[in-house]
Amino acid sequence: MALSHDPLWPRAGVWPAFEQSADAVILGVPTWRTSLSPTGAHRTPSAIREALLRYSPSLIGPPAIDLNGALRIADAGDIHEPDGDEGIASVIARMRELAPAFVIALGGDNSLTYPVALGADTTGLITFDAHFDLRDGISNGSPVRRLIEDAPEGSRIDPARIVQIGIADFANSSHYAQRAADWGIRVIALDEVRRRGIDDVVGEALEVAGSGDGRIHLDIDVDVCDRSVAPGCPASVPGGLAAWELRALSRAIASDSRVVSADIAEVDATADAEDGRTVRLAALCVLELLAGRANRTRTR
């Protein structure tokens, strides 16, 4: 990809390798082997990094802010073979090594949410997702259930501290909807998000997931978006969130200091549109998360 060079127009994504004392760290977690549908999602972390170079790290403001100056951002590379028991252990260990930095994990399918949230020692979970991810077994359809039932004792997330935003009609079964209700998960379906507005929904989600001295993990499953903006998500459907809604939600949630980690999941770079719109949206979500992290410093 040939890009122009302008010393007065720096590019995002040109971040050094991780060293201690970083404010925010990018980590590739290319899970894909347990996906319920065929996927090339393991190729997505590198595609997102390439797409980041298309963007500037600058917030227009006013005042204008360069994220590269406001934050110490680093890239910790990728986890090699993150699937399976050994892979899960590697992700958890690496997440703990990166603490206390705000870690943005680049998937990969949605199975990465389980080890990333465990490694960040989170007590609450917020998902942007069209689906519940409460299936039995081990797959990209089960990470929320696994955090409730399969995690080691003392690390399980209380379902009363889980908020799922953007759950869609005709994309789930009534069985899993009932499971979410029985377990006390707060579900804010797509229609409710649009009726109430982003600020109201974000306020409730942070209160529920971050109650007390909570530590929140944010799972951004890009298939919550309308298929026109996320064709590279195998399970995205027409009528999902607009790109601007996902970006606004991501920045707003990441602005809260209780949010210690995030992941971006379910983008298959090999199935994207020719213009790369899904991967580019995922890259913008990275920048929105960093903008939220920078907001914490600005508002202290």
Image (cartoon, helix red, strand yellow):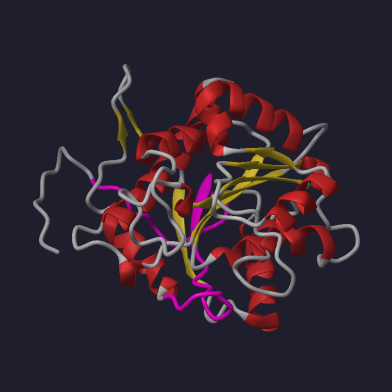
Indicate left or right for 106 with 4 as reference: right
Q: Is residue 149 above or below residue 284?
A: below
Report the residue that reaches farthest toward the right.
153
Q: Quadrant of residue 47?
A: bottom left
Q: Which residues are magenta?
A: 11-39
- In this orientation, which residue lies closer to the viewer: 214 or 42? 42
Q: Is residue 14 visible?
A: no
Give the dominant element type of the magenta stretch: helix, strand or loop. Answer: loop
Q: Position of residue 26 (x, y in %)?
A: 47, 57
Percent position (x, y) of residue 252? 52, 30
Residue found at x 39% / y 67%: 268
Q: Relative to 200, is 240 on the left or the right? A: left
Q: Position of residue 161 (x, y in %)?
A: 78, 41
Q: Is residue 24 in the magenta section? A: yes
Q: Can the viewer see residue 223?
A: yes
- The answer to whether 251 is drawn above or below residue 90 in the figure is above
